[in-house]
Amino acid sequence: MAAQVLAEAGRAVTVYDRMPSVGRKLLMAGRGGLNLTHSEDLATFMPRYGAEAARLAPLVDAFPPAALIAWAEGLGQETFVGSSGRVFPKALKASPLLRAWLARLRELGVEIRTRHDWAGWDAKGALRFRTPDGEITAGSDATILALGGASWPKLGSTGDWADLLAAQGVRVTPLKPANAGFDVAWSEIVRERFAGQPLKGVAVTFGRVRVRGEAMVTRHGLEGGAIYALSAGLRSTIEREGSARVWIDLRPDARVEELAARIGRQPVDQSAANRLRKALDLSPLETNLLREAHGKDLPADPAALAAAIKGAPLTLTGMRPLARAISTAGGVEFGGLDAQLMLTARPGVFVAGEMLDWEAPTGGYLLQACFATGVAAARGVLGRLGGQAGG
């Protein structure tokens, strides 16, 4: 994105990528439909970025969701708003968008060099790259680093840039998993029978925060959108206390009294599983989740059973590894950047995307901030170079 903004302003741009082809992480995002952004208004949108919302606000304001949608459609990729308010290309994949984008960059004269692994700077300040043919160096009037976080390292973002920048005096918050699953000490029956099954239309509460959505049971524990939305707080609590407890409401649209009345109409001589299936259409997974939370012998009293359904506590004991996370928390601290995302410790070097110290839940917020910071960094370069010629 930064390359496009710079090239459209008439600058000579070279993109170096460590992988054999570009856009691999974008293609991975496309496996989920390529959720580009979200349609909600910015007053609701920006708080999704948590502690860094105020720092990101002017960057997203300068390239908001409407601008991102217009950019995608300008590449021939019509978009639509899903039922949850998320915005997707109608193709529901990344490959058509990436092909059109790369064609646009070629038209603008952007040069792309793959299999170039950035290795820092040499003594004269030139960029160093490891290539299949050995190490090379390259000069530039300005540099934008967009090296990603450290999730899905096989796609290219290994996070090894953190040590390179720290050696230059750049403050880097340690990289941690974001939007990742959490560990639960499931019983054998849940691990063997229900791994891979979703909990749909549930509400998950942690502390004072309640999130509606979907969770997925895995052999290790829980993942999914409703869990990801709580991941920052859950991660912090687990780091501090060793575990965190969430409460799952399996029927968030019904009151306890309503559930109790429906359960009470079922014969008391039936098993709890049958009563729950007939009264509330609870699935075997949901019934077994209640047993995980409340014990094998569920209460027979309708009111107590209804209360159990409205609040099933589960203890999360850890977070899944960074390499398997959707995104990364931590990164280059905003305190070491100017308003145009240039490193104060390394003038002329700008940082964009997931390298920066911010995080957000899934829902379009991740890609939106990556695009917006790419635009911001490119505009910062243009502001710094002014009327100078160069690349």
Image: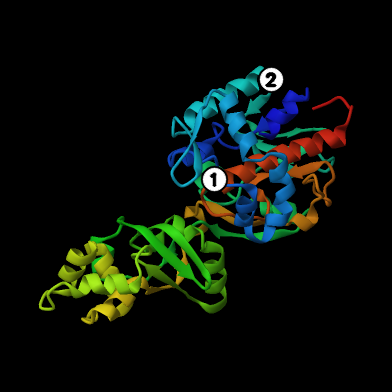
Q: Residue furthest top?
A: 107
Please state which of residues 331 and 43 is positioned toward the viewer in this rendering: 43
Q: Which mark is residue 108?
A: 2
Residue 157 at least partly seen = no
* Residue pointed to by mark 1: 364
Q: What secondary structure is found at the residue carrying circle 2? A: loop
Query: Which quadrant is home to the N terminus?
Result: top right
Residue at the spot x=54%, y=54% of the render? Answer: 361
Give whichever of discs 2 and 1 has the lower sequence position. 2
Residue at 55 percent across and 73 percent down: it is 237
Judging from the image, what secondary structure is the residue with disc 1 in?
loop
Q: Nearer the viewer, residue 169 or 10?
A: 10
Query: Are discs 2 and 1 less than 8 Å apart at CB?
Result: no
Front residue of this view, candidates 137 and 101? 101
Point out residue 169 in the picture as x, y percentages from the top left corner.
80, 56
Of the numbered discs in the image, which one, if any, rests on residue 94?
none
Task: Report how far apart the C-alphas of labels 2 and 1 lie in the structure.
Answer: 28 Å
The image shows residue 125, relative to residue 331, as above or below, that is above
Q: Amino acid at mark 1?
A: Gly
How many tags in the picture?
A: 2
Closer to the eye: label 2 or 1: 1
Residue depicted at 24% across the width and 81% down the height: 299
Q: Is residue 361 above or below residue 203?
A: above
- The picture places residue 182, in percent across and down from the top left corner, at 44, 64
Residue 276 is left or right of residue 173, and the answer is: left
Looking at the rendered structure, the kind of residue marked 2 is Leu
- The residue lying furthest to the right in this view is 387
- Residue 191, given in percent of the width and then of the height, sits at 28, 64
As drawn, the residue found furthest toward the left would be: 269
246 relative to 339 in the view: left or right: left
Q: Residue at x 83, y 43 (%)?
A: 123
Viewer can see residue 202: yes
